[in-house]
Amino acid sequence: MEKINFEWYRGDDETETLVFESEGEPVDFTGCDFAMDIVPEGRGGRIRLSLSDGIAVEGNRVQITVSHDKTDGVAWQSAAYDLQMTDASGRVKTLCFGKIRLKHDITRGL
Protein backbone atom coordinates (compact mmCIF):
# COMPACT_ATOMS: atom_id res chain seq x y z
CA MET A 1 0.00 0.00 0.00
CA GLU A 2 1.44 3.30 -1.09
CA LYS A 3 0.82 6.84 0.13
CA ILE A 4 0.08 9.15 -2.82
CA ASN A 5 -0.92 12.78 -2.38
CA PHE A 6 -2.75 14.84 -5.00
CA GLU A 7 -3.07 18.58 -5.51
CA TRP A 8 -6.21 19.63 -7.40
CA TYR A 9 -7.91 22.88 -8.30
CA ARG A 10 -11.48 23.39 -7.05
CA GLY A 11 -14.07 23.25 -9.83
CA ASP A 12 -11.70 21.68 -12.38
CA ASP A 13 -11.93 18.29 -14.05
CA GLU A 14 -9.06 16.29 -12.58
CA THR A 15 -7.60 13.01 -13.85
CA GLU A 16 -4.93 10.86 -12.23
CA THR A 17 -3.53 7.63 -13.69
CA LEU A 18 -2.02 5.12 -11.29
CA VAL A 19 0.03 2.13 -12.46
CA PHE A 20 0.29 -0.90 -10.17
CA GLU A 21 3.04 -3.50 -10.18
CA SER A 22 4.03 -6.27 -7.81
CA GLU A 23 7.67 -7.36 -7.79
CA GLY A 24 8.16 -5.57 -11.11
CA GLU A 25 5.23 -7.31 -12.83
CA PRO A 26 1.91 -5.66 -13.80
CA VAL A 27 -0.96 -6.42 -11.42
CA ASP A 28 -3.89 -8.19 -13.10
CA PHE A 29 -7.16 -6.45 -12.22
CA THR A 30 -9.39 -8.69 -14.37
CA GLY A 31 -12.78 -9.17 -12.67
CA CYS A 32 -12.05 -6.67 -9.90
CA ASP A 33 -14.28 -3.92 -8.55
CA PHE A 34 -12.97 -0.55 -7.33
CA ALA A 35 -14.11 2.15 -4.92
CA MET A 36 -12.51 5.40 -3.82
CA ASP A 37 -13.83 7.58 -1.01
CA ILE A 38 -12.69 11.18 -0.59
CA VAL A 39 -13.51 12.49 2.88
CA PRO A 40 -12.96 16.21 3.57
CA GLU A 41 -11.33 17.25 6.82
CA GLY A 42 -13.83 19.27 8.81
CA ARG A 43 -17.09 19.98 7.03
CA GLY A 44 -17.99 18.75 3.59
CA GLY A 45 -19.65 15.91 1.80
CA ARG A 46 -17.95 12.64 0.99
CA ILE A 47 -17.17 11.96 -2.67
CA ARG A 48 -17.46 8.31 -3.77
CA LEU A 49 -15.99 7.08 -7.03
CA SER A 50 -16.59 3.66 -8.57
CA LEU A 51 -16.28 1.84 -11.88
CA SER A 52 -19.63 3.37 -12.89
CA ASP A 53 -18.60 6.90 -11.87
CA GLY A 54 -15.02 8.13 -12.03
CA ILE A 55 -12.81 5.03 -12.11
CA ALA A 56 -11.64 3.28 -15.27
CA VAL A 57 -9.30 0.28 -15.37
CA GLU A 58 -7.20 -1.01 -18.24
CA GLY A 59 -4.69 -3.73 -17.45
CA ASN A 60 -2.72 -2.54 -14.43
CA ARG A 61 -3.64 1.14 -14.95
CA VAL A 62 -6.34 2.73 -12.82
CA GLN A 63 -7.57 6.11 -14.03
CA ILE A 64 -9.37 8.30 -11.51
CA THR A 65 -11.48 11.15 -12.87
CA VAL A 66 -13.15 13.71 -10.63
CA SER A 67 -15.51 15.90 -12.62
CA HIS A 68 -15.63 19.62 -11.91
CA ASP A 69 -19.14 19.45 -10.45
CA LYS A 70 -17.89 17.27 -7.55
CA THR A 71 -15.64 20.04 -6.19
CA ASP A 72 -17.24 23.19 -7.61
CA GLY A 73 -17.95 25.63 -4.79
CA VAL A 74 -16.92 23.33 -1.92
CA ALA A 75 -15.39 24.96 1.16
CA TRP A 76 -12.89 22.25 2.10
CA GLN A 77 -9.20 22.53 1.29
CA SER A 78 -7.94 19.13 2.43
CA ALA A 79 -9.35 15.62 2.32
CA ALA A 80 -8.20 12.09 2.99
CA TYR A 81 -8.84 9.31 0.48
CA ASP A 82 -8.21 5.65 -0.12
CA LEU A 83 -8.59 3.43 -3.18
CA GLN A 84 -9.80 -0.10 -2.60
CA MET A 85 -10.02 -3.06 -4.93
CA THR A 86 -12.26 -6.09 -4.43
CA ASP A 87 -11.23 -9.17 -6.38
CA ALA A 88 -13.53 -11.79 -7.88
CA SER A 89 -13.43 -13.90 -4.70
CA GLY A 90 -14.51 -10.94 -2.51
CA ARG A 91 -11.09 -10.14 -1.02
CA VAL A 92 -10.58 -6.42 -0.35
CA LYS A 93 -7.21 -4.72 -0.77
CA THR A 94 -6.42 -1.03 -0.21
CA LEU A 95 -4.12 -0.11 -3.09
CA CYS A 96 -3.20 3.41 -1.99
CA PHE A 97 -4.21 6.23 0.33
CA GLY A 98 -3.26 9.82 0.99
CA LYS A 99 -4.35 13.44 1.07
CA ILE A 100 -5.91 15.69 -1.51
CA ARG A 101 -5.04 19.38 -1.28
CA LEU A 102 -7.72 21.44 -3.00
CA LYS A 103 -6.60 24.88 -4.16
CA HIS A 104 -9.49 27.29 -4.38
CA ASP A 105 -10.29 28.88 -7.70
CA ILE A 106 -10.61 32.62 -8.18
CA THR A 107 -12.41 32.78 -11.52
CA ARG A 108 -15.91 31.34 -11.41
CA GLY A 109 -17.48 29.72 -14.47
CA LEU A 110 -20.09 31.58 -16.48
Image (spheres, rainbow, N blue to C red):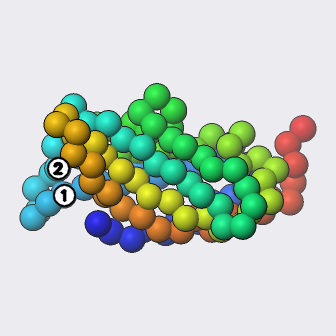
Disc ID at residue 27 = 2
Specify the quadrant of the image occupied by residue 38: bottom right
| Within-10-Å neighbours for mark 2: few <14, some 14–19, many 20+ | some
Foreground residue, 92 or 7?
92
> Is 41 left, or right, of 15 in this rendering?
right
Q: Residue at x 87, y 54 (%)?
A: 107
Q: Identity of the amino acid at label 1?
A: Glu
Disc ID at residue 82 = none
Foreground residue, 70 or 103?
70
Q: Identity of the amino acid at label 2?
A: Val
Q: Is residue 103 visible?
A: no
The N terminus, quarter of image: bottom left
Specify the quadrant of the image occupied by residue 109: top right
Q: Residue at x 14, y 60 (%)?
A: 22
Which residue is farthest front?
90
| Residue 52 percent location from the top left of the image | 46, 28
| Within-10-Å neighbours for mark 1: few <14, some 14–19, many 20+ | few
Distance from disc 1 to disc 2, alpha carbons, whole Å, reads 5 Å
User: What secondary structure is marked by label 2?
Assistant: loop
Q: Residue at x 27, y 53 (%)?
A: 93
> Is 17 left, or right, of 40 in this rendering?
left
Q: Is residue 87 above or below residue 12?
A: above
| Residue 32 percent location from the top left of the image | 25, 36
| Residue 77 percent location from the top left of the image | 71, 67
> Is 61 left, or right, of 72 in this rendering?
left
Q: Is residue 91 above or below residue 98?
A: above
Q: Is residue 53 visible?
A: yes
Q: Residue at x 69, y 58 (%)?
A: 9
